[in-house]
Image: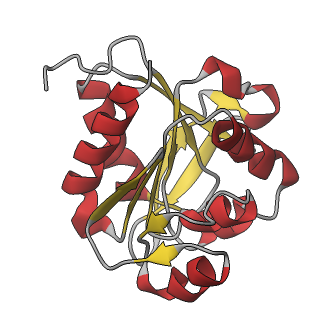
Amino acid sequence: MSEQTLKGRKVAILVTDGFEQVELLAPRKALDEAGAQTSVVSPQDKQVKGWNFTDWGETVPVDVPLAQAKPEQFDALLLPGGVINPDTLRMQPEAVAFVKAFVDAKKPIASICHGPWTLIEAGAVKGSRMTSWPSLRTDLTNAGAEWVDEEAVVDGNLVTSRNPDDIPAFSRAAIEAFARRG
């Protein structure tokens, strides 16, 4: 793939406090390097605080507050994990509606680790082949997905990965999926 594979593509990164820091920063860097314009979208207005494996991490500026974000202005969606982040987002109707709009528009979505919790809440996993952090296996299976233990799984418009170790494969798969979108 060329350096600017995603030139002109706009990618929303939906997070709130407690996102797994590396699961936002590393894929975002790969997307930016591929030419995408990435925007952190959050229910928080100014900044969000990451989780760095075992303790609070860096803060990241919010580019677009969720209340002002319009899914139609983006070509793709990135859902980082962490336990706190997707668990909080799936309880916020505005965040779930934002994700559901990408699902309904058949736009590509890449989700890692615990990120698929928000996809479950948006009704987006039934009939899909997916992976995640192992503790979500039962949740995904109960929601109608086929859970597999692979570093990066692409099924239709969904890209999923298990954990931070999978980020290189996850980022490559996300870039390929996001590039396919016309």
The quarter of the image holding the C terminus is top left
Q: Does 89 sit left or right of 161 as displayed?
A: right
Where is residue 98? Give x, y as percent: 74, 41
**Rendering quarter of residue 127:** bottom right
**Rendering quarter of residue 139:** bottom right
Along the viewing direction, whichever of 71 and 53 lies nearer the viewer: 71
Where is residue 142? Give x, y as percent: 65, 84
Residue furthest to the right in view is 93
> At 25% from the left edge and 25% from the top edge, which residue is drawn?
34
**Rendering quarter of residue 20:** bottom left
Along the viewing direction, whichever of 58 and 169 lies nearer the viewer: 169
Q: Does 69 sit left or right of 113 as displayed?
A: right
> At 70% from the left edge and 39% from the top edge, which residue is drawn?
104
Where is residue 89? Give x, y as percent: 72, 58
Along the viewing direction, whichever of 80 and 123 lies nearer the viewer: 123
> At 41% from the left edge and 78% from the top edge, which residue is drawn?
54
> At 44% from the left edge and 67% from the top edge, which residue is drawn?
130
Specify whether residue 44 is in view: no
The quarter of the image holding the N terminus is top left
